[in-house]
Image: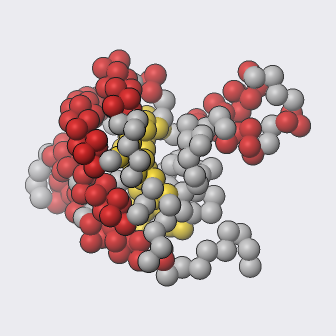
Amino acid sequence: MIAPNHVAIIMDGNGRWATARGLPRIKGHKAGVAMVGEILDAAVSAGVKHLSLYAFSTENWRRPDAEVSVIMSILRFYLRLFTNILKDKGVRFHFLGDLEGLPEGIQRDALALEAATAGASKLVFHLAVNYGSRIELVNAVRSCVRDGLKPEDINESAIYSRLWTAGVPDVDLLIRTSGEMRISNFLLWQCAYAEFYFTDCHWPDFQKEQFNRALEAFAARERRFGGI
């Protein structure tokens, strides 16, 4: 089975997973983060080279302050914890999103993790935090203007090179858990020709078996890239 080069996952259902078990929503977020290591292992084993996980969108700031605060605390804890874990797995970390819009401690930890894993080559792990695709595209166009490009020089290449994913291949397979069938402002440009896979499984229950099932579904499809 030929694995997709770039898999992106919208990790949905943490809160519903917790509610179904009579637990606080934050327990669902903790359980969701705990699944990341298993999916990283599954991606490496399958031969996937890029894995993008949607952890926190620009719209998620609208959640209750207490929930956002705890999510940020969990994020910072795992950014530190992941240093040795990712190095041992041969995984390089790449922050994806508006880093400057996050607390300074998270900014430092994210940059430190990128530096610590820079030499890893088995897989690139793109973690999308404070990410919104429309903002990413607006920023790319503004960058073209700041760089003095003429209207006729603003083409796909010019925009691509100014995205937060510059240099990263387009998404081949987009997975969303928890039964929702939308992409929620995630990698709109990069998913132009991606195959979509939706599952009712909540993210904390999305284990290696479910991940491999998505890869098998991808392998069975005939990709046309816009052709007939």
Drawn side of residue 29 relative to residue 53, left or right: left
Q: Is residue 16 visible?
A: no
- Report the residue at 56% width, 41% height from top: 165
Residue nearest the observer in this picture, 179 or 110: 110
Picture coordinates of residue 4, whole percent (x, y):
49, 65
- Report the residue at 51% width, 40% height from top: 132
Drawn side of residue 206 relative to residue 9, left or right: left
Q: How is the image coloured?
A: secondary structure
Looking at the figure, which quarter contains the N terminus?
bottom left
Q: Quadrant of residue 82?
A: top left
Picture coordinates of residue 52, whole percent (x, y):
43, 50
Count of numbered circles in the view: 0
Residue at the outermost left position = 22
Picture coordinates of residue 75, whole percent (x, y):
27, 35
Looking at the figure, which quarter contains the C terminus?
bottom right
Q: Quadrant of residue 212?
A: bottom left
Residue at the outermost top position = 104
- Report the residue at 81% width, 22% height from top: 148
Picture coordinates of residue 48, whole percent (x, y):
43, 60
Drawn side of residue 16 relative to residue 7, left or right: left
- When the figure is inspected, residue 12 is found, relative to residue 130, above or below; the finding is below
Q: Is residue 212 visible?
A: yes
- Report the residue at 45% width, 53% height from top: 50
